[in-house]
Image (spheres, rainbow, N blue to C red):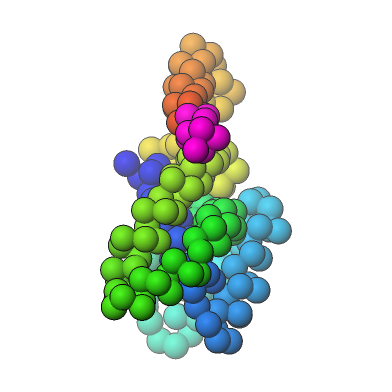
Amino acid sequence: MRGTTPIGSGSIIAYVIALALRFGRGPSARFLGRIYIVPLFIPSVIASYAMITFLANHGFVDGILQAVGLPDGAFPKIVFDWKGIVITQVWLSLPFMTVLLSSVLLEISDSLIESARDVGASSWQIFRHIVLPLSAPGALIGVTFIFLGVIGGFTVPYLLGPNAPQMLGVSMVYYMTNYFEPYIASTQAVAIFLLSLVAAVYYVRQQFKREIR
């Protein structure tokens, strides 16, 4: 279940950002449009070490909290725990997912939104009956890409994850190199492939449906 947390969390946050970029106005929306893309240019290994530097026990944030008088251990354990994996994976996947969702939302005509407002529809009704149904297929395709990135991820879980339980990619490498259990590693590799195959089949089916339309 924890392996799916970056997928769900990242998708929801990216969808909210995409909505703000599509329908937001003013300096805050423009500022968000400039900064959300930053993680796309940061390698995962650099992001992982940054998380260790800032969020580990006795790291930068913990040092600040102790400097202002909080006791040692007041900062919750984030790094070398599943929470560190979730935070880093969500942060790294946000730009790609947001770009994809923004392109999907741009396909929704402004005239359609204005027509709904002219007949008295509220913002919630417009979102529920127009924006969400029209953007859902594209959003699900984006989720499949994030799923593939998370299920096959190694760098972030290896550097930030706990000793146990481990994500499949890290566990597979350990069984192959440290425990000398190639059969278990091969079984895990097949499991990753089958899960990826399910996502690939879903993506291909969605593409065929879009072409038929």
The percent position of residue 3, horizontal first and vertical second, equals 40, 42
**Quarter of the figure with the N terminus:** top left
Q: Residue at x 54, y 58 (%)?
A: 107
Query: In the displayed structure, would residue 196 be above or below residue 162?
Result: above
Residue 151 seen by the camera: no
Closer-to-camera residue (177/204) = 204
Report the span colored magenta. Answer: 203-213
Magenta run includes residue 206: yes
The percent position of residue 163, horizontal first and vertical second, equals 44, 40
Residue 12 seen by the camera: yes
Query: In the displayed structure, would residue 181 be above or below residue 207?
Result: above
| Total numbered labels placed on residues in the image | 0
Predominant secondary structure, magenta span: helix
133 to the left or right of 143: left
Q: Residue at x 34, y 68 (%)?
A: 126
The percent position of residue 76, horizontal first and vertical second, equals 37, 66
Closer-to-camera residue (81/186) = 186
